[in-house]
Structure formats: structure tokens, C-alpha cells
Amino acid sequence: MSKAASMDKLIDAFGERIDSSNLLAMIRQSFGIDLEALPVTPHPRAVIDSFLEQAAGAVTGPEVRSMLNETLAVNLDALSALEQARISLFSKGQWMLRQPDDLFAVHTGEGDVDVAIYPTEYYMQQTGSSELPKPLIDELVQLGFTCGEGRRSCTYANPAGEPVSDAFKGRTMRAVTMAAASLV
């Protein structure tokens, strides 16, 4: 069962009297993410309380996930879709996805302004190489990344100093996902 489906099941089983404490616990249980520890504004509990007050009744998992993406830029649906991709993701000060057999790590900086992509220890053990695969490097360079000497990581920093767009995140994650899939 996906993380999103697990969250939906918990919400459905709870019923109409859900509060922010319960919802935050369900997200933590389903996704392993502590939303209250994220360095985001507004505070997640206040956002959820306001959402639940406006909903005045039962809410669904998709509604909650959409609201969190819109208000806090935490895309739980995207995280759920990536859970089998063998990619570790560090964002907003914590690991959002991470498994021992992940092949690549995507590490975003504060405010999603910059990102680094590098191979994991598991990848290096399995391939005997500490370098990113050339097709991945080529794809990342086309997106505007700079890859270091030795091809051990690629980085991107938005020159405008603003968070990168969802479209850019999507293209980047597709490139990394395709590279991971080609190795499995």
C-alpha cells in the first residue's frame, strides 16, 4: 500500500471529528515526516486547524494533501509516487524519503533555492563507482545543473534566489528516477 493510500485509510477510519493533532500523527505514521519540525511559515498546525475549521466536517486524504502542497509546498502525493523509485530526498531540513537501498540522493537547500544530486553509499557499493551515470549527468546539465570534477555530484542554484518551480522539480526528479530505473 502506498503512503498516500495508508494516510487515506487512516483518515477514513477516523471519521468526521479529526483534529490537527490526529492529522499530524497520521501524516507522521504514513510518511514518516514531522510537519511541525519543518522550517515553514505559516506553522503547519495553524494551517491544518484553519483547513479543518473551513471544512466543517469530514476531509479526505487527497484534500489534505492538496492543501499542504498549496500552503506549505509539501507535496505528499509526489513523495508517495516516489516511494519505490530508490531515491532519497532531503528537503525542508529533514529526510522526506530514505531507504537503505536507494541509489541516488536529492538534497535541497533552504527554501528549495538550490539542490545537489549525488550517489548513495549503496549505489557505490553496488556499482563500484562513486560517479553519477553519464546519461544522468547529461540530462541534469541540460536542465542547468553544474556537475563537479569527478562527476560525483551535480548542483543547481536558482540564479534569482527564489525557490525552483514545481515544473523544474518535476523534470529533475524524472531524470533521477529514470536513471535509477535503468540500474535496477
Image (cartoon, rainbow, N blue to C red):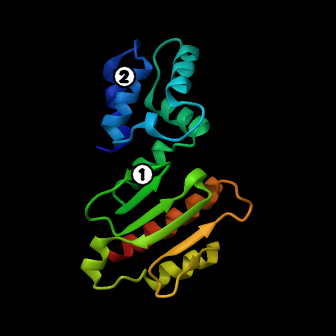
Image quadrant where one finds the C terminus: bottom left
Q: Nearer the viewer, residue 30 or 152?
A: 152
Residue depicted at 42% across the width and 57% down the height: 89
Image quadrant where one finds the N terminus: top left
* Type of amino acid at the residue the image marks with label 1: Ala
Residue depicted at 70% across the width and 58% down the height: 161
Percent position of residue 123, x then y: 31, 75
Q: Which residue, given by chain and number where applicable, does mark 2 sit on?
A: 22
Q: Is residue 37 left or right of residue 112?
A: left
Q: Element under label 2?
A: helix
In the image, residue 156 sits, relative to residue 16, either above or below, namely below
Residue 114 occupies quadrant: bottom right
Q: Is residue 9 left or right of residue 96?
A: left
In the image, residue 93 sits, relative to residue 38, either above or below, namely below
Q: Which residue, given by chain and number where applicable, does mark 1 sit on?
A: 81
* Type of amino acid at the residue the image marks with label 2: Asn
Percent position of residue 140, x then y: 56, 75
Q: Element under label 1?
A: helix
Q: Is residue 109 left or right of residue 178?
A: right
